[in-house]
Image (cartoon, rainbow, N blue to C red):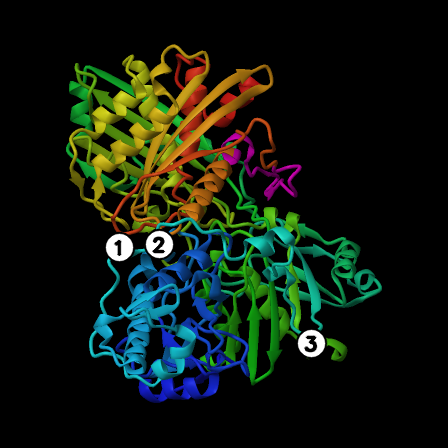
Amino acid sequence: MSGEVRLSRRRFLKYAAGTAGGLVIGIGTVGAVDRPAPLGLLGDAWTQVGPYLRIAADGRIFIGVRDPDNGEGTATSLARIIAEELDADWTRVVVEPLGLGVTMGNGEAKFTYGRQRSGDATSIPAAWADLRQAGALGRWLLLQAAARRLGVPAERLRTENGMVLASDNRRVSYADLASTAAGIDAPASPPPLKSPDCYRLIGQPAGDVDARAVVTGTLRYAFDENIGDPVVAVLARCPYPGGTLDNADREAAQKVDGVYAVLDIAPEANQPPGMTAQAPALAVLARDTWSALRGRAALKATWKADGSPEPAASVLEQQALQAFDDETIAPSTVRNDGDTAAARKKAARALEATYFQPWVAHATAETPNCVVRLDPGTSVTVIAATQSPRQVYAVVQRMTGFRPDQIDIQVPRGGGGFGRRLEQDYIAEAMAIALAKKPDEIRNRPVKVLWTRDDDLSRDFYRPLAVHRLNASLDRKKKIVGWHQRMASPSALAGRGVPDNRLWQSELVPDALPAGLVPNFRSDWYPLPSRLARGEWRGSPHVTPTFASESFIDELAHATNTNPLDFRLALLGDARQLPYSGRGGPIDTARMANVLKLAAEKLDWSRWLRSENGLGIACAYVFGAYVAHAIEVAPTKDGIDIHRVVCVADVGRAVNPLGLEAQLQGATLDALSTALNLAITVKDGKVQQAGFRDYPIAATQPMPYEVETAIVPSTAEPAGASVVAVPSAAPALANAVFRATAVRVRRLPLLRELARLR
């Protein structure tokens, strides 16, 4: 299904030229002679454009985007990287999302398009080198073609906006050169890349390539996709982790007009979370969504928990506190510099604080869904919004046993990811239904699985609940000389093949600040038992510990009667590079100090002490990016009003500043909404939230009218942007509330503090 033609590079280019009348180039494959070419690039007889650049005879430039776009702006940014090096006319660029590129080589699957993953701020950093090379190769070939056409050495020609220009003002369009360029062999070594001072697209603001379709309602999301006339399936899932079916009226469901069948679905044994169905379920198959929902209601399914139901959050919190106090329990030590115990004994002052964070859901705008067409023994097509097409392939291949050329995975635009679409449970459900024995009338019809909002909230892969206890030791100069942080949480890596002594990796980053800034520093992690499904959530593992550490720093500043900004800058100290074992390091303390100062300046931090409102500030280093938030709030009789929010980010070179600004604003608002309103709660062994009435995404009040953003100009390698503004937003808000309410006792958790205000 992922049709390919294996040809030598020279023969392939000639073949492509003869078929499509254009030039076809593979991404980052200057030396790759035998990379398979998607048939879609060879002309209008095929419909899908692959992860290649194609310059058509009519002047349009097709650019395939390999990473899924779930609202992060990936399609725009990745396409502009290629278009920049090509010197393309952006108005003639057509951007196409790609399905999974996979072939068989040496008896195993080979992923020809690269990593194909989005949502964890890696798309641009991972693509920066090879996408520029793809565009540079296209430009080089076009220059060679123009040299032949114009009789001028290629080095005396230049490119601009889809044209090759000679010094005598002669010019030839890329469209006129495409066929000739397709017959030229690639160079022996990669062509030179453009100098950044010649960039015309990178660094300039561009609207989302799908913006018009989004606002006019014409964009097709995964939810809109169909293959033929699919059978619609909705599932009644067991609400108890580890529970089983008690009773269901299958006959009543099947009597509903439009219902075809009711099928039992069970998780596959010995599969990690996210790679199989999450819970036992009954799937109602019907001619349309309404009939399926009516059939599900008629089931009146009841379920029963097993002998160890999921505890409430308060029980887990108490277990965490007991673990912190029990010296016989050995935690996983994430980092241990110096001697924190000795520093505490010698300290002029020691302070301690405890923070609680609830379970949190993803609540993507578009709930999980998947379409499957199975031709038994022949092929399978899967259409679904996902953040990891390769994981979809792993599920489909395991369940069908098909070869790569029998599996077609298509990835349309998705309505939000946030880490939820890194899990493939909804894919496994759809595949299980497609493979199940069904009535003759629907046996060969495609299947479309749809999740409702209550399905989504009650069976998510949640951000884990967490409890933090932090101790700090200060000397007589108010300098932090010891820092001991303890964190307890149910690891999001549990059950995923990670050794027990490394389960903390989904919860903590060993080198996250203030590590490296304090001579005696220790970080410990304690596992909490839970059967709720857990997963990545918007910047994990940065977001949860950053809330605790940045809030605690404000408490230390308050206890020492120090301006929180000055306290942070003193902690950062002189400009230097701190070792960092995670993605994006080392940490440049000067860049961090810079975003802090800029955020404070834009909020007019000079009035911090005298303002009637509360001003809060926080910062974070996330996947190579430096981010700071400064927030102003005012207490009201009903709670708080957020007057202003400033977000400053240094992400290295910004490919699309407008898209970056949108990501910073969206992530900030999401983080504030989560901090103010949201928590998943468990009662009687099951999740209580079933809709936005129970999980209230923030409305106009008390949210700010706007998020003021500032992007630091930089020539450093680009970092990702989709999640970088999440970790520091909530602690900046908490610090503003802390200041506004003049709390002079140990800070309460943010959610409890706001509840007290209300």
Q: Amino acid at mark 1?
A: Pro
Q: Residue at x 40, y 50 (%)?
A: 656
Q: Is residue 206 magenta?
A: no
Q: Amino acid at mark 2?
A: Ile
Against 78, residue 590 (above or below) is above
Q: Residues within 10 Å of mark 3 (few under 14, many from 20)?
A: some
Please state the extent of the stretch shown in magenta in the rendering. 673-695
- Is there a contact, CB below 8 Å, between mark 2 and mark 1? yes
Of residues 658 and 260, which is closer to you in this image?
Answer: 658
Of residues 642 and 620, which is closer to you in this image?
Answer: 642
Q: Residue at x 27, y 80 (%)?
A: 186
Which residue in the structure is indicated by mark 2? 202
- Looking at the image, is mark 1 or mark 3 earlier in the sequence? 1
Which residue in the structure is indicated by mark 3? 445
Disc marking residue 196: 1
Secondary structure at badge 1 equals helix
Give the dominant element type of the magenta stretch: helix, strand or loop: loop
**Location of residue 372 in the rendering, given as x and y in whole percent from the top left corner:** 60, 71
**Location of residue 13 in the rendering, given as x and y in whole percent from the top left corner:** 37, 84
- Give left or right: position of 12 versus 510: right
